[in-house]
Image (tube, coloured by chain):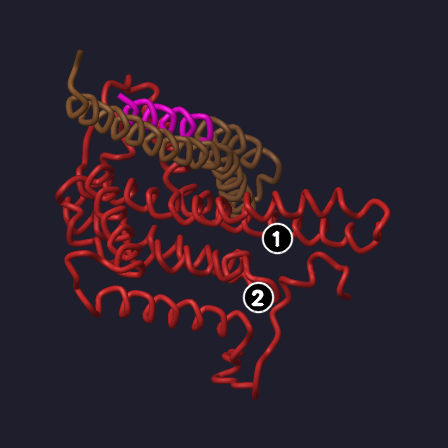
Amino acid sequence: MATNPMHQFSVHKIGPEIKINGIDLSFTNASLFMLLSAIFILLFLLFGTKEKKIIPGKIQLISEILYNFIGKMINDTAGKKAKPYFPFIFSLFIFVLFCNMIGMLPYSFTVTSHIIVTLAFAMFIFIGVTILGFVIHGFKYLKIFVPSGVPIVLLPIIMIIEIISYLSRPISLSVRLFANMMAGHTMLKVFGGFVISLGLVAGWLPLTFSVALTGLEILVAFLQAYVFAILTCIYLNDALNLHH
Amino acid sequence: MTNPEDLETRLKIAKSKLQNKNTKDNGEKGIFLGNAFKLGTELVAAVVVGSIIGFILDNWFGTKPILIIIFFLFGSVAGILNVIKAAKRMQKNRD
């Protein structure tokens, strides 16, 4: 069981079974690690903003950098109109980041390596952005399916293609995060298993790889959170600033 | 003969320039890697969505293999369109 690289992704119940109307709402290890990330984020940001010094301490510095980073990203990709959505994108980014980073600790569970979690995020963003587009622009929002300068003969085909392209957004958003996290963690486990099975004789080589991959995985964990947030900004930009 | 104070300020300016350049480069490299991750799934997702739509429509109308083939092709086109759009966006950000 310990050598099975997929074992780390299994969800199991912690504590009693809770069932409401036949829906299983038991507390699992996935819920535990989501809760842990939320608590860590709260503590981190609380300590970061507790003493507002002019010369910031380490935690204050990191939280200020994060704030500026997201603020700049939203401003660059979605413009000034997206300012009210800063809290949403910031919490999204920091939650995905903390879930990914906590998943890098040994014996922990990576919440974002489950497609249902990432798909829930992505569908929430997708539906939210679509509703936002219709609220702001009304039925004019449908214009994003009709690019300008297309001959009328080609229009039906182009529209089908644009609709498929629009519908593929949540899939690509969720699959990217899920696949990267799952593949990385599986690979780490496989190389870890090689270290044990090859022993003292040749186990050093996979151990080196394992160390290098851990570094890469930390980079990927950050990058995927970043990509998730920046794509949300881009979709938000499409909904806010309709261009033809 | 330049005075030592002048040299010191010049050195400081040069060092700060170098530092700025380095940090900027590292940040950009990270963003490029992020973009690279983005492109791959962009292509696949549209094909998957197209095929699923084709499959559902086929089940509705009972025209088993025809619509799924057509929508698979539409999905592939949409995937390529997605990649072109993403690449254009990347190019625009660089300029």
Output the chain of dot 2: A
Query: Which residue is under mark 1?
Result: A185
Q: Give residue A75's position: percent from left, percent from top.
A: 19, 41
Q: Which chain is red?
A: A
Q: Quadrant of the N terminus of chain A?
A: bottom right
Indicate the secondary structure of the residue bearing disc 1: helix
- Circles 2 and 1 in contact, beta carbons < 8 Å: no
Local packing at callout 1 (Cα closer than 10 Å; few below 14, some 14-19, many 20+) is: many
Depth order, front residue of A181/A236? A181
Determine the CA span between mark 2 and mark 1: 11 Å
Left or right: A103 in relation to B95 = right
Q: Give residue B92's position: percent from left, percent from top.
A: 28, 24
Q: Which chain is brown?
A: B
Q: Which mark is residue A108?
A: 2
- The residue stretch that appears in magenta: B79-95
Q: Quadrant of the C terminus of chain A?
A: top left
